[in-house]
Amino acid sequence: MQTKASDRFALPLCQRHHDEQGGKIGTFRQRAGWRSFELKYGFNAVQIASEYWRLWPGRAKWEAGNGQG
């Protein structure tokens, strides 16, 4: 049975960058997962996802309704 990661850790990516991060496009050297993707584009995925989560207007309501608040 598969599990889905929490949306708290989701990042919006365009289709091209989603495919690149997942290794569907690019050179073999570029297909090394999140760390290589972060280094190439100069960001930290966990920090960015945390910031999106913090700024989401519906977060407080979602957390209260899901036992998080």
Image (spheres, rainbow, N blue to C red):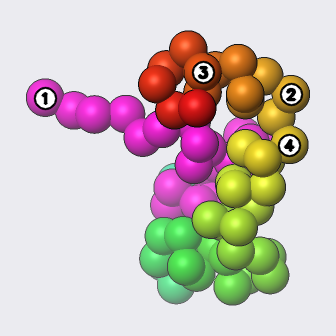
Left or right: 31 as drawn, with respect to 52: left
Please report whichever mark, 1 or 2, sits nearer to the chain's N-terminal start: 1
- Which residue corresponds to the image point at 80% horizontal and 81% vertical from the top-left? 42
- Disc 3 residue crowd, few under 14, some 14–19, many 20+, Cα 10 Å: few
- What's the amino acid at mark 4? Leu
Q: Position of residue 68 (x, y in %)?
A: 51, 32
Please tell me whether residue 63 is drawn above or below residue 9 in the rendered image: above
- Which residue corresponds to the image point at 51% horizontal and 55% vertical from the top-left? 22
The quarter in which the C terminus is drawn is: top right
Helix, strand or loop at label 1? It is loop
Left or right: 37 as drawn, with respect to 42: left
Are circles 1 and 2 on residues that touch, CB within 8 Å? no
Residue corresponding to mark 2? 57
Q: CA distance from mark 3 to mark 1?
A: 28 Å
Are circles 3 and 2 on residues that touch, CB within 8 Å? no
Residue corresponding to mark 4? 55
Front position among marks 3 and 1: 3
Q: Nearer the viewer, residue 29 or 1?
A: 1
Q: CA distance from mark 4 to mark 2?
A: 6 Å
Q: CA distance from mark 4 to mark 1?
A: 32 Å
- Disc 1 residue crowd, few under 14, some 14–19, many 20+, Cα 10 Å: few
Dot label at residue 64: 3
Please report whichever mark, 3 or 1, sits nearer to the chain's N-terminal start: 1
- What's the amino acid at mark 2? Pro
Q: CA distance from mark 3 to mark 2?
A: 13 Å
Please report whichever mark, 4 or 1, sits nearer to the chain's N-terminal start: 1
**Range drawn in magenta:** 1-23
Helix, strand or loop at label 3? It is helix
Residue 16 part of the magenta-drawn span: yes
